[in-house]
Image: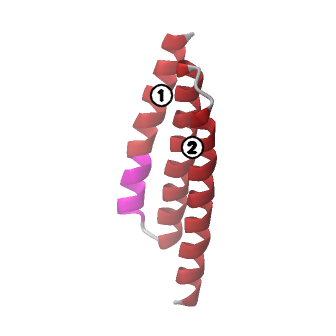
Amino acid sequence: MISLLNFTILILSTTIFLCVYRAIKGPTISDRIIAINLVGTKVISIIIIVSFIFHESYFIDVALVYALISFSASIIISKTIKEQ
């Protein structure tokens, strides 16, 4: 079971690099925002998987705080772009 979770973390990490590439190369600003949101979501997933592997529940709290910060940043960036 642990090896499956480790493989999942490896796949998620690979797709994070692909999303970062899209965030840098994205033809439009909306592509970049979506890529950054995907990176945040994948990082949250990795944190929760690590929490399951180590049997530590405080990682869930860290993931929730990270999700709130990521959501707030997305809203602020979207409002900033809309004003321009």
Vertical order, 2 against 10 (above or below): above
Report the side of 13 relative to 77 (left or right). Answer: left
Q: What secondary structure predominates along the stretch shown in magenta? A: helix
Q: Give the mark toward the camera: 1 or 2.
A: 2
Report the side of 13 relative to 80 (left or right). Answer: left
Disc ID at residue 20: none
Identify which residue, 70 or 57, lies in the foreground: 57
Three-letter code for the amino acid on which mark 2 is drawn:
Val
Residue 52 lies, in percent from the top left, at: 59, 23
Residue 67 lies, in percent from the top left, at: 61, 52
Identify which residue, 8 or 66, lies in the foreground: 66
Identify which residue, 1 or 68, lies in the foreground: 68
Q: Which residues are magenta?
A: 18-26
Q: Is residue 29 magenta?
A: no
Identified at 57% across, 74% down, the residue is: 76
Q: Is residue 22 magenta?
A: yes
The secondary element bearing badge 2 is classed as helix
Q: How is the image coloured?
A: secondary structure
Identified at 62% across, 37% down, the residue is: 60
Q: Which residue is mark 1?
A: 9
Identified at 57% across, 47% down, the residue is: 41
Residue, far bottom? 84
Quadrant of the rendered image containing residue 70: bottom right
Identify which residue, 46 or 64, lies in the foreground: 64
Quadrant of the rendered image containing residue 48: top right
The number of numbered badges drawn on the structure is 2
Q: Which residue is mark 2?
A: 62
Mark positioned earlier in the residue sequence (1 or 2): 1
Residue 81 lies, in percent from the top left, at: 53, 81
Three-letter code for the amino acid on which mark 1 is drawn:
Ile
